[in-house]
Amino acid sequence: MRIRILSSILAEKIGKEIEIKIGDEITLEELKEIIAERFPDAREEIKDIFYNFSLNGRLIRAEEMKKVKVRDEDSIIIFPSIAGG
């Protein structure tokens, strides 16, 4: 699957675009674990800081991360959470 990174901090650690082959369906939460394993410098960043995920153009809510499945043919965008007031 193609993963685009729209966070400058995370992109510095793993790149602006990465390709990951998983071979089977996994959840987005499991994908975060795979990214943390493959890119140890980004482990704390990807696990401790909240990021939004877009799957094939659809924003995935935080409570969906453990349910939504992804496949090799999917396109994912990871971008930082933005809060305002």
Image: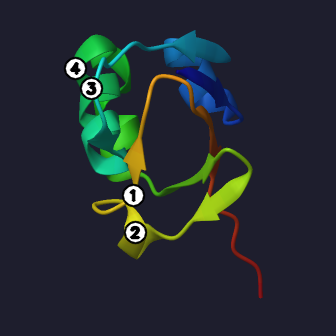
Q: Are marks 3 and 2 in contact (CB under 8 Å)?
A: no
Query: Residue 59, percent across and down?
Result: 65, 62
The image quadrant that residue 81 belongs to is bottom right
Is 55 above or below relative to 6?
below
The image quadrant that residue 68 belongs to is bottom left
Q: Tell me which amino acid carries mark 1.
A: Val
N-terminal-most mark, 4 or 1: 4
Query: Residue 55, percent across and down?
Result: 60, 47
Q: Tell me which amino acid carries mark 3.
A: Ile
> Can the viewer see residue 15?
no
Q: The C terminus is located in which quarter?
A: bottom right
Query: Residue 74, percent across and down?
Result: 57, 32
N-terminal-most mark, 1 or 3: 3
Secondary structure at badge 4 equals helix
Secondary structure at badge 3 equals helix
Can you identify the residue that label 2 sits on?
64
**Gap in Å between the C-alphas at discs 4 and 1?**
20 Å
Circle 1 or circle 3, nearest the eye: 1
Secondary structure at badge 2 equals helix
Circle 4 or circle 2, nearest the eye: 2
N-terminal-most mark, 3 or 2: 3
> Can the viewer see residue 47?
yes
Q: Residue at x 74, y 50 (%)?
A: 57
Can you identify the residue that label 3 sits on?
34
Q: For residue 37, which numbered disc appears in the image? A: 4
Circle 3 or circle 2, nearest the eye: 2
